[in-house]
Amino acid sequence: MVRLYISRLRLVLLSAFAFGLNASAPVPALASDNSPALIPAVQQIEMKAGQFHLNRQTKIFASDMVAKENAQLLSVAVQKILGVSLPVMLGKPTAQEQNFVQFLSIQTFAPSEAYNLVSDTKSLRITATAAGQFYALQTLLQLLPLHKQAVIDLPAMEINDTPRFAWRGMHLDVGRHMFSVDFIKKLLDQMAALKLNTFHWHLTEDQGWRIQIKQYPKLTQVGAWRKETTKDRHYEPYIGDGVPYGGFYTQEQIKEVVAYAQRLHIMVVPEIELPGHSQAALAAYPELACTPGPFAVATNWGVFEDIYCPTEPTFTFLENVLTEVMALFPAPYIHIGGDEAPKTRWKASAQAQAVMQREGLKNEEQLQSYFIRRVEKFINSKGKRLIGWDEILEGGLAPNATVMSWRGEEGGIAAAKEGHDVIMTPTSWCYFDAGQGPAEQELWQLGGEITLEKVYSYNPVPKVLDESQQSHIRGVQANIWTEYLPTSAHVEYMVFPRLLAMAEVAWTPQDRRNFADFEHRVQNYYPRLDQAKIAYRIPRPLGLDTPVQIGKEWQWTLTAPVKDSKMFYTLDGSEPSPSPKGKLYRKTLAVKKDAAAVLKVLTVLPDGRVSAVQVAGIPKPAAQASTQK
Ligand code: ACM
């Protein structure tokens, strides 16, 4: 069959035609190759001549009940735009049908998350498994306009898409700060839109135990509550805020989140930390420690020396806890933490030393390895797989464990060489508690700097691995630690837009990735985040880092980083303020080269949200570009 490729020029003309003659029905925004601006970028797309016009007469067909579920999600989304509900019909369209969308289920499409989407002037057809159809739907949803229209024009095209990695994750620490079920659902919705499929739920910490365990009620009666929280960063010397803090998820709430995630094809992996980061559990059950206690739920951040003692009562406790946890989470994985467990108490404990002697263990690292192996054996006996942070390599890796490499990539590389599966989450690219720009120009951050570009630059497959070792890199994940993120708005700021970059790292083939193109597509994505009421970090105005030198002047021509937002500036070093007092940016700003001027800009979104002040220094002599990189 002859494929019809559409030329660049033709598409530009087509777009102009669509905008000019039918302003209410623009074609979707375009990426730099003139294909629709999607995040994550698809594996393969061919643009063709013509458009499919989805309108009130369009019929939706579903080949079976699985397809019907996906088709109905489209019908609901389209109703918001067209104002009518398009019926979903079970069955296939006749050959005469002229205007339809079809969801066609197949059972043997490999790998199972792949999909094929074909649109022409008459129809839009999706062929895939249930998960693949769901991802085709997410692609399609990104092509829909955000506002009411009579007709939705979609380009004729064929997409063949499949994820690069099986594990496309986001982690959330709810121990340091806790977030509502509604907020978690909101995050899951965003993850699904970006084709992420794994939610790693960090449920237990020194500062709070957040999951109801019926056999051990004190875990939440005592362990879920702390007396107060460190005020700002006053941990040394310590100053508390004096405000009691706590909460937990009931088993019913956990089930609700898991079921919600399942509908979004997201696996929820619970993390129950052991043997360290367990001070909240020890506050509830001090007999599980090597020293008598008492212990308090931690009120400050850090790594604590009081950890579970490797005794029989501890293993019984953990097995009982894990049994309840496994019943709540259908995921094949249980994350057991394993990180940051100081051995101080074990070294001084006669009980711990006796276990080492009994088991013939040479040091406390081997004792940790024994601890993890025992827990793994139990988890495996229940048909589940253990995953842990890369410290589980120390003293010998448990036989079937999957390693989450966070202290760089070395742990992941070592594990893959030993034939273990690996999830890459190295701090330098994947820790979303770091700032997204220079600290003084951020609303908040924990420390360090991981820009959108840095996240995007990550390639989770280390070159030092051979092909068979590389196949053990199962995926990649962003981690959200919440010491300094007390509210959902803080979390949203840290997660977005960086999660968009992580989604593309996780989904899109490496050779299809290009940051400049991605950045352009991100601009197009902000209105979707606005519609979902996500308090994302408002990016720097475009052009702030690229002043041009004209004669004796530096000139900045700025573009608002988000559509319909306004920029306010100062040039005298004072803080810009939004209207009515502030100076609204209207046209190119010029500054004499030798003037001591500082350009400061803030951006105000249509909804009133204000960015952090962004600063562009005058470039040093001879530097044509920014001082801000
Ligand atoms: C970790 O960041 N402690 C896994």
Image (cartoon, rainbow, N blue to C red):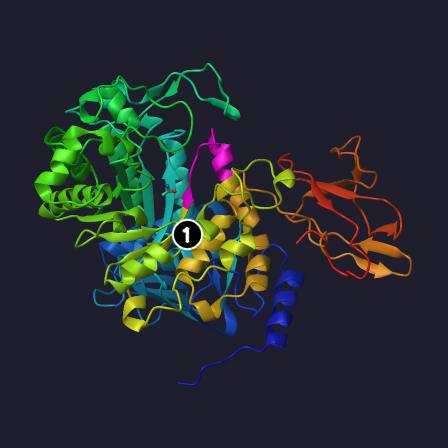
The quarter of the picture where the N terminus appears is bottom left
Residue holding disc 1: 426
Query: Which span is picked out in magenta?
Result: 479-492
Instruction: Examine the rendering and report whether any part of residue 276 can be seen.
Output: yes
Residue 118 position in % (x across, y down):
40, 69
Q: Quadrant of residue 469?
A: bottom left
Q: Is mark 1 within 8 Å of ligand 1?
A: no
Residue drawn at x 52%, y 56% is 151
Q: Nearer the viewer, residue 374 or 164?
A: 374
* In the image: residue 609, left or right of residue 281: right
Question: In what quadrant does ligand 1 lie?
Answer: top left
Instruction: Examine the rendering and report whether any part of residue 84 can be seen.
Output: no
Residue drawn at x 48%, y 32% is 485
Residue drawn at x 77%, y 61% is 624
Q: Nearer the viewer, residue 367 or 547?
A: 367
Residue 275 lies in the magenta stretch: no
* In the image: residue 46, left or right of residue 257: right
Structural crowding at the residue carrying mark 1, measured as other residues with C-alpha within 10 Å and reported as few (<14), some (14–19) or many (≥20): many
The quarter of the picture where the C terminus appears is bottom right
> At label 1, which amino acid type do we have?
Pro
Q: Count the marks.
A: 1
Residue 331 position in % (x across, y down):
22, 47
Q: Nearer the viewer, residue 405 or 189?
A: 405
Vertical side of 113 occupied by 364: above or below: above
Residue 102 position in % (x across, y down):
34, 62
Q: Secondary structure at mark 1?
A: loop
